[in-house]
Amino acid sequence: MSPRPERGARTGRSRSGPRRPPARPQASARNAELLAKFETLTPDTAPRRFADLITVPELLLGVEDRRFEQTTPIQSAVFDTVAAGHDLVACAETGTGKTAAFLLPLMQRLLQENREREGSARILVLAPTRELAVQIEDDVQGFGYHTSMRCAAVFGGVGMDMQEQALKAGVDIVVATPGRLMDHLRAGIAKFDGLEILVLDEADRMLDMGFWPDVKFIVSQLPTDRARQTLLFSATMPEEIMGFALEIMRSPKLVQIGSRNAPAATITHKAELLGRHEKTAWLARFLRRASGPTLVFSATKRGADRLARDLQSQGIRAAALHADRTQQDRLRAVEGFKSGTHKVLVATDIAARGLDIDAIETVVNVEVPFNREAYVHRVGRAGRAGSTGTAITLVSPDERQDMEAIADAFGLVLFEDAHQELVEAGEQVDGPDGVTPIAPTEPAPPRARRPRRPRGTVTAVATPEADAPAPDSAEGAAHVDGEPGEAPEATTADGDAPRKRRRRRRRRSGPRAEGVEAAADDAPPSGGEDQDTEA
C-alpha cells in the first residue's frame, strides 16, 4: 500500500495540467451496506421484439419509424418492472439504450390510461445537460409522433418565454436540467401537482457536476400526498446516489447490467505515450487517416476551442462543443457532427453528455480523465448499443501513473509508444526544452559545487582577460560575492578581515546605473503562463 501523503501535499495532476479532484472509492463497506437494502433483480436480458412489448398501435408505429426492432439487455431487463410501476435503480454502461428503456414503458402506460391532459405534467425527467435534455425530447417526439403526447424541454442558455408558454399550455412530459427548472419553480411557472413519475437520468453525472443540491431541492418541492414512481438511471453508482435513492423511493429494486462502473466489453482500449507538446501533432496525423467520425475530449473549454482551431488550420473538419458556446452554436456543432459536415467533435465532459450518436467509432482523450467514472462515461460514447468501438487516451509522462491506475482497475493492457511513431514518421515536435522522453533517461552527473570560502574573504570572478593586471581603483575591481562593482574590503595585517559595517545602499547614477535599469526593463515579467483551469 502506498504511503498516505502528508497534510498539504499536492495531489492530482502536475503543474503542467489542470488540477483533478480525488478519485472516488469504487467499493467500500458502506457501499456494500447500501446495496444490501435494495431488492436486486436478476431479470432475463435476452433480446425481445418491440412488437411483442408495445401494445399501443400508435406508439409501435413511432418505434418502427425509428427502426427499433429488438431490445438491448437493459431494455429487456427493466421494461416489465417500469411498466408495473415499481421504483427502480438501473445501472448500465453508457450507450446501452437506457433512455428508451424508461421512455417506452412509461409512454405506453400513459397512453393506456387515456386520461385527459391536466395543467400539470405527469412525468418529470431530470437530465444534467442541455444536449441530453434535447435528445430525450427528440426521443419522446419520435416515439410519440403518431400519438397526442406532448413534451417540453426546459434548459438554460435560451430565453424562458417559449418554455413558459409550453408549460402553461400543458404537457405530458417535462424534460429539464436542474438549474433552469429551479428558475421556473421559483417563478411559479412549473407546477407538478399531478406528477406521477420522476426520472433521474445520468444521475452520477448530475452528482459530479454539483447539481445534487438542486436535485434534492426539486424533489422536495414535488407533492407527497400521492404515490409517485421514481426511476434512477446511471452508468456508475456512487454511495451518495444509492443513499439518496433509498431516501426517496419505496421498496426500490436494483438492476445491474454488465460490470458496474466498468466500460463496455465491445470497446478496444489504447494509451499512446508521447510528450504533452506532441499531442496535437499525433492527433492530426491520426485523424487524417481515420475514416469514421471521432469524438475528442478536452479537459477544458479553452483547450477544446484551441484544439478545434488547430485541427481546422490543418484541413480537418472540426467543431468545438462546450458550455460557454451559445445554444445555437452547440446545436449546429452536434447536427454538423451527426450529418458528417464535421468529422471531429472536440468536447468537454459536460457538453458531451447526451450525445446519442451510434456512428461514433473512436473516442480520443487528449488528457487522462479525472477518475475511473469519467473514463467510463467518455469511452462509452463509442461502442454504443453493442457495436464495437475504440478508445484512445494520449498520455504524457506526468500522466502515466494516473492512466496505469485506470488500466489496472479495468484489467487493460494498452500502452503504445506514440512518440516513437512520430519520430519514425518524421513528424516529431520539439517542446521548449526538446522532445520529452517517454522512457526515463540516465540522470545527469551532479554539478560540482564551489567550496565555501571563509567569511570576509574575496573571490575574484574569472574574466576573458584573466592575464590582465588588476585595476587599482575600486570602481574597476572585479565582482565579488556581494554587489556587482563593489570594491572588496581591506584586510588587516594579520589577514583577518575587519567586521563589516551595515550601510545603506545608495541609488547609483551615471552610465552604469542607467544600463542596469535598462536591462531590468527588458527582462520578462515573473510568473508562468496562465493555467487554463476552467471546469
Image (cartoon, rainbow, N blue to C red):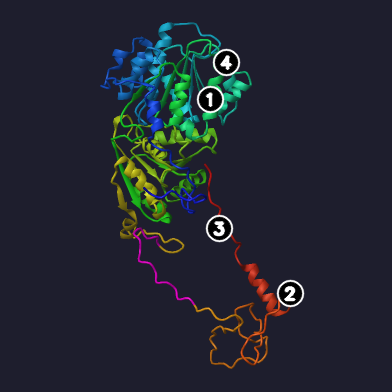
Q: Position of residue 136 (x, y in %)?
A: 44, 24
SS category of the residue bearing label 1: helix
Spatial CA span between label 2 and label 3: 33 Å
**Helix, strand or loop under label 4:** loop
Q: Nearer the viewer, residue 67 or 527?
A: 527
Can you give x and y, in whole percent of width and height, for residue 79 in the image?
A: 34, 17
173 sits to left or right of 159: left
Residue 242 on the magenta span: no
Density class for disc 2 (Cα within 10 Å; few <14, some 14-19, many ≥20) is few
Q: In whole angstroms, how far apart are the C-alphas of marks 4 and 3? A: 52 Å
Q: Which residues are magenta?
A: 435-449
Find disc 2 in the rendering and name its residue: 504
Tell me the amino acid under the disc marked 2: Arg
Q: Which residue is mark 1?
A: 216
As measured in the structure, the alpha-carbon distance from the residue carrying label 1 to the one carrying label 2 is: 65 Å
Q: Nearer the viewer, mark 1 or mark 4?
A: 1
Q: Quadrant location of residue 161?
A: top right
Is residue 236 visible to the viewer in this orientation of the structure? no
Residue 191: assigned label: 4
Q: Given the image, on which type of amino acid does mark 1 rest?
A: Lys
- Of residue 197 and residue 307, the one placed in the foreground of this image is 197
Q: Is residue 385 left or right of residue 480?
A: left
Prevailing secondary structure of the magenta residues: loop
Q: Earlier in the sequence, mark 2 or mark 4?
A: 4
Q: Are marks 1 and 2 in contact (CB under 8 Å)?
A: no
Q: Give the structural element (helix, strand or loop) at label 2.
A: loop
Q: Which three-letter amino acid code belongs to the residue tagged 3?
A: Gly
**Position above or below: 476 against 190:** below
